[in-house]
Amino acid sequence: MPDEPELRSEIAAQGPEPVLDLRPEKGFAHIRHAARDFRDGFALFRLGWTLGWLDIKLRYRGSMLGPFWMTISTAILVGSMGVLYATLFHIELRIYLPFLSFSLILWAYLNTTVSDGCATFTSSSGLIHAMRMPFSLHVLRVTVRNFLTFLHSVGVIALVFIIFRIAPVPDWQIPAGLVLWGTDLYAITLLTGVLGARFRDMPPVTASIMQILFFVTPVLWKPDLIYAGRQYMLLDPCYPLIEIIRGPFMGLSVRPSIWLVAVLYSIALWIVSFSLFARMRARLAYWV
């Protein structure tokens, strides 16, 4: 058994002991620590992707068709609602069905992001308490999981577009819209995750808000049906976010005003999300 001097030398050789600093953050320290959390989280991108993929596998474990159940249900929903609402709105099916399929699937992606985002940190409480990991890694995990869920329904859009011969506009709008969507959905997951960790009644609140926005946003109805006061549609933050993706993929050009409002909404969203995360990051482990 080693004596005390040998034990001390062995401990010294292992490096300095970890120190838990409980001093309150001063100045811009919380912003610096939040930025470091993002850096460390994205450095573990492969781990976040693996965790998100594992969530999908566990969700469909024991299922016969697995994720194809979602594809089949989406196809049935789009087909039935497309025929019904095309008749009610007196719109040709070849025009309305591609619009409806793309809109419904995009809205489902956005709605899933908001609802799952509320449980970003609470659902990972065991992992958060077990080991020290960047909180942004859990946000990345939920973002990847929702993206993989969205891919299950992309085949429905592709089939409808092939049947009705809808071709996207090959210009800068498609990659720019995809980048803006990816960053915004990550910020939404971060924002709702922090609020959901602090306030446990966030899921029903966000569900009510998204239900109202579903009828206000042109998802079931085309924006062309609004003749007077169309500029007020830009007050709906979901409309420009959906339109910058839906328009180019359906072969339509998006107005510059919609792009401008979408970028402004994205900047405001990131400022609010990052500021809230930076301020509340040190308390998340105690809330979950």
Image: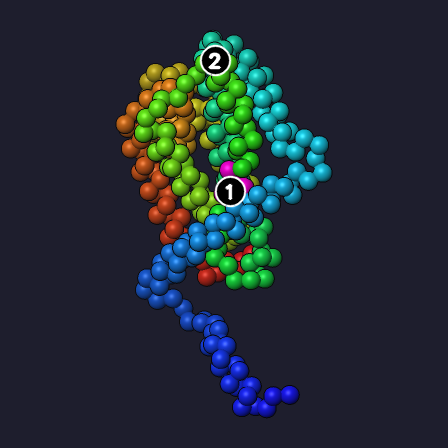
Q: Position of residue 120 (x, y in %)?
A: 53, 48
Q: Which residue is mark 2?
A: 164
- The foreground one among 34 and 55 is 55
38 over 98 or under it: above or below: below
Would residue 162 be found to the left or right of residue 244 on screen? right
Q: Residues within 10 Å of mark 2 (few under 14, many from 20)?
A: few
Q: Which residue is mark 1?
A: 144
Would residue 49 be found to the left or right of residue 225 on screen? right
The type of residue carrying mark 1 is Val
Q: Give the residue displayed 64% in from the left and 88% down from the top.
A: 1
Q: Give the residue displayed 49% in from the left and 43% down from the top.
A: 143
- The magenta-colored residue range is 142-147
In space, the residues marked 2 and 1 are separated at their CA atoms by: 31 Å
Would residue 192 be seen by someone viewing this image from the given angle?
Answer: no
The type of residue carrying mark 2 is Phe
Would residue 80 be found to the left or right of residue 227 on screen? right
Q: Give the residue displayed 48% in from the left and 73% down from the top.
A: 18
Q: Is residue 154 magenta?
A: no
Q: Which mark is residue 242?
A: none
Q: Position of residue 61 (x, y in %)?
A: 68, 40
Asked which quadrant contains residue 204, the reply is top right
The quarter in which the C terminus is drawn is: bottom right
130 over 173 or under it: above or below: below
Would residue 51 be seen by someone viewing this image from the given angle?
Answer: yes
For the residues bearing labels 2 and 1, Cβ distance under 8 angstroms: no
Q: Earlier in the sequence, mark 2 or mark 1?
A: 1
103 over 110 or under it: above or below: above
172 over 45 or under it: above or below: above
- The foreground one among 210 and 183 is 183
Q: Give the residue displayed 53% in from the left and 16% down from the top.
A: 82
Q: Position of residue 4 (x, y in %)?
A: 57, 90
